[in-house]
Amino acid sequence: MKRRYKNDANEAAPMIKLDLFLIAFLSTLTIRMVAVEPHQDEMSAIAPAISSISVMTDGFDFPVGAPNAKGYYNAQKFGVNNHLGDDWNGVGGGNTDFGDPVYSVGKGRVTEVSQFFGGWGKVVRVAYTYQENGVEKQVESLYAHMDSVYVKKDDILNRGQKLGTIGNAEGIYLSHLHFEMRNKIALPLGQGYSKDQTGYLDPTKFIKAHRPK
């Protein structure tokens, strides 16, 4: 009996090793499949997440001197010197507009509030959904160099609601509002200047074409 048991064990050893190998392989395959599935779910969820990030607005106003930028002028327009936004200054010049209110250009959701220091200072981003020719579209605004900020991420703002005040990026510039409009949500912060305008809109042109009715 002992010899037969020993032979059986010897004969069974390769089978046991094979079984263990198959179990390990199948376990690894299962783990990989489980790891992939959430990634696929996340990828498929990107579209609805982006589409729900903003709220519908009935139109757009200017970010200073609301609603029509009264008392302000566009000191450096979109495209001039490869500028990716508008620089709004008070007509008094210098720092006379320091601390003046900055307004949300439409009804939207705050997507970012950050202090970047350097050439940006305090930055607020707000995303909006609007209709154009029966089609829902989205844009995101960026307000930079601010002194005070009165909002936080995910706040819902009304068109014309005060979100902060004009600043000077902690003394780097004379006070003004650097303002951008982007037709791609959540682009990187960027540099404020570039020959490549992909994802950026002419803010003044866009606002004039989408005033409240």
Image (tube, rainbow, N blue to C red):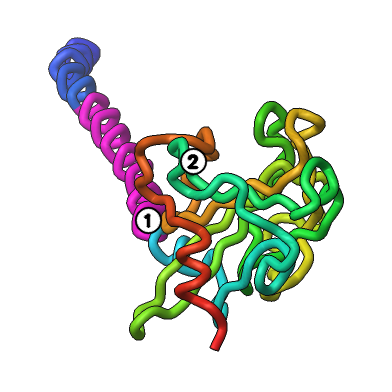
Task: Locate the N terminus and report the quarter of the image it occupies.
Answer: top left
Total labels: the figure holds: 2
The crowd level at tag 2 (other Cα within 10 Å; few <14, some 14-19, many 20+) is many
Would you identify the image quadrant in which residue 4 lies?
top left
Residue projecting furthest to the front: 92
- Closer to the camera, 48 or 106? 106
Magenta residues (range): 19-45
Q: Is residue 157 above or below residue 7?
A: below
In the rendered image, which quarter is residue 67 located in? bottom right
Quadrant into which the C terminus falls: bottom right
Which kind of residue does numbered mark 2 sit on?
A: His
Q: Nearer the viewer, residue 111 or 141?
A: 141
**Res 30 visible:** yes
How much space separates mark 1 and mark 2, taking CA atoms?
39 Å
Question: In the rendered structure, does residue 72 fall within the stretch colored magenta?
Answer: no
Which is nearer the eye, 25 or 77? 77
In the rendered image, which residue does mark 2 sit on?
83
**In the image, 43: left or right of 151?**
left
Task: Please rate how many residues cluster around mark 1, counting C-alpha atoms within 10 Å: few if below 14, some from 14 to 19, many from 20.
Answer: few
Q: Is residue 211 left or right of residue 169?
A: left
Label 2 SS: loop
Residue at 48% in and 44% down: 84
Please tell me the numbered disc located at residue 41: 1
Amino acid marked by disc 1: Asp
Q: Magenta-highlighted stretch: main secondary structure?
A: helix
**Residue 112 visible, this angle:** no
N-terminal label among 1 and 2: 1
Observer-side mark, 1 or 2, equals: 2
